[in-house]
Amino acid sequence: MDSSSFLAFLSSRASVREFAPDPVDEAGIEAILRAARTAPSAGNREAWDVVVVTDPEVREALADAALSQPHVREAPCVLVVAANYVRSMSRYGERGILFALEDATIACTYMMLAAHAAGLQSCWTGAFDEEEVREILDLPAHAKPVALLAVGRGRVPAGRTERMELAEHVHRDRW
Ligand SMILES: Cc1cc2nc3c(=O)[nH]c(=O)nc-3n(C[C@H](O)[C@H](O)[C@H](O)COP(=O)(O)O)c2cc1C
């Protein structure tokens, strides 16, 4: 893939918040998870975990924990991505907290893009009550949930969002 095709691929992804009920098949889920495994991580510690949620009752509970955002209930699959502090802190101490958060968000990004490559739609969902999510999923204390990635087939076409100009982000040599 050349760089313009890669940019076109990235640009063609957009968040979708209305999903059809059809389940994501196991092969699709597996493809997304395998992509996450290729993500870079600090010291190759792979300090991330994911809970694959397809059970409607658990999705319902997660939606409640996510400020009642309906797409979390509607999406047939919700990938709850967590930073695994133990895996990273056992080598890096306090710095491992940041590394684990980075590892988890990179892994989630790879999952989001893999879903897109598979012709699925998704919505990264960060607004949720951490304690509620922890309780619903029985997360251990060393796992910090960072994102609920709602995945499925969109019912409506993805809407394009604007971006700031590059010049607003980019600094050269000094800020
Ligand atoms: C860290 C993070 C948290 C987000 N949380 C939410 C959320 O709670 N609910 C939601 O509908 N979208 C959420 N989004 C999706 C963003 O709103 C979306 O990515 C952004 O508006 C750009 O649109 P696009 O994904 O279509 O390019 C989140 C995205 C990120 C990266």
Image (cartoon, rainbow, N blue to C red):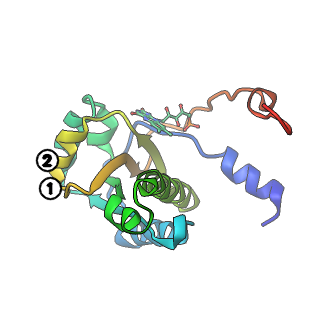
Q: Looking at the figure, which quarter contains the C terminus?
A: top right
Is 106 in front, or is 142? 142
In the image, is 112 to the left or to the right of 72?
right
Report x, y in % for residue 91.
Answer: 42, 69
| Left or right of residue 81: residue 120 | right
Residue position marked by numbered label 1 in the rendering: 138
SS of the residue under disc 1: loop
Q: What residue do we see at 46% from left, 47% from top?
A: 122
Of residues 156 and 7, the one drawn nearer to the viewer in this rendering: 7
Please say if 156 is above or below 58: above
Q: Is residue 29 above or below residue 68?
A: below
* Residue identifier under label 2: 135
Q: Quadrant of the N terminus?
A: bottom right
The numbered mark at residue 151 is none
Q: Secondary structure at mark 2?
A: helix
Gap in angstroms between the C-alphas marked 1 and 2: 5 Å
What residue is drawn where x is 44% and y is 42%? 123
Left-right relation of 109 to 17: right
- Contact? badges 1 and 2 (CB < 8 Å): yes
Give the vertical position of 117 relative to 172 (above or below): below
x%, y% of residue 107?
Answer: 48, 59
Q: Is mark 1 within 8 Å of ligand 1?
A: no
Q: Quarter-wise, where is residue 89 in the image?
A: bottom left
Where residue 167 appears, as percent x and y from the top left, is 81, 29
Tell me what residue is drawn at x 44 percent, y 51 percent: 101
Q: Amino acid at mark 2?
A: Glu
**Residue occupying image coordinates x 76% and y 26%:** 168
